[in-house]
């Protein structure tokens, strides 16, 4: 009987986890908090880049509203990530990629940029690797 108790306890403890994951609500504020915390815990260059990530939280949390559209939330979250000024930090959705554009602007092109500048400018979207812009026509 003693051995069954020991084996049972060993079984229970071997399949229990000490890992406690934070739970965030699937709301605008919850998604903001989840993204901010992921960056806070995993991005290692804040001090190197002299970014006060807590101050960024304060500034951007004030911009989050449960009434905002998905596109507006995506834009705010992308702007928050751009604060780290890192071309490798992107927010990807099926309709666009939020990115730190100045990193790309300084990268040397292997094509004539006049065409892209003329037709796309800098406020274009990216989906599936393609750059696009929906023209706004005045009537």
Image: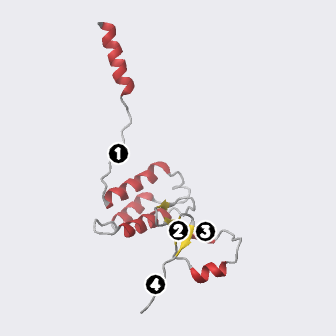
Circles 3 and 1, Cβ within 8 Å, touching? The answer is: no
User: Residue 104 — which label?
Assistant: 3
Q: Which residue is mark 1?
A: 22
Residue mark closest to the camera, 1 vs 2: 2
Label 3 SS:
helix
Q: Earlier in the sequence, mark 2 or mark 3?
A: 3
Q: Nearer the viewer, residue 16 or 131?
A: 131
Residue 45 quadrant? bottom right
Q: Earlier in the sequence, mark 1 or mark 4?
A: 1
Circles 2 and 3, Cβ within 8 Å, touching? The answer is: no
Q: Earlier in the sequence, mark 3 or mark 1?
A: 1
Image quadrant in which the N terminus is located = top left
Residue 58 quadrant? bottom left
Residue mark closest to the camera, 2 vs 3: 2
Q: Which residue is mark 2?
A: 126
CA gap between label 1 and label 2 equals: 31 Å
Q: Earlier in the sequence, mark 4 or mark 3?
A: 3
Residue 33 quadrant? bottom left
Circles 2 and 4, Cβ within 8 Å, touching? The answer is: no
Q: Position of residue 43 (x, y in %)?
A: 50, 52
User: Residue 119 — which label?
Assistant: none
Q: Locate residue 48 relative to residue 107 in the image: left or right.
A: left
Relative to 104, say whether 47 is above or below: above
Image quadrant in which the C terminus is located = bottom left
Q: Which residue is mark 4?
A: 136
Q: Position of residue 116 (x, y in %)?
A: 62, 78
């Amino acid at each position: 009987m003693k051995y069954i108790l020991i084996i049972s306890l060993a079984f229970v403890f071997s399949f229990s986890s000490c890992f406690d994951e934070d739970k965030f609500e699937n709301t605008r504020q919850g998604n903001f908090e989840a993204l901010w915390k992921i960056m806070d815990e995993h991005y290692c260059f804040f001090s190197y880049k002299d970014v006060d990530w807590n101050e960024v939280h304060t500034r951007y949390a004030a911009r989050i509203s449960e009434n905002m559209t998905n596109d507006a939330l995506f834009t705010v979250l992308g702007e928050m990530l751009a604060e780290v000024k890192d071309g490798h930090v992107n927010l990807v959705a099926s309709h666009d990629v939020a990115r730190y554009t100045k990193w790309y602007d300084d990268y040397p092109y292997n094509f004539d940029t006049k065409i892209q500048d003329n037709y796309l400018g800098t406020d274009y979207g990216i989906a599936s690797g393609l750059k696009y812009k929906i023209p706004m026509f005045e009537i």
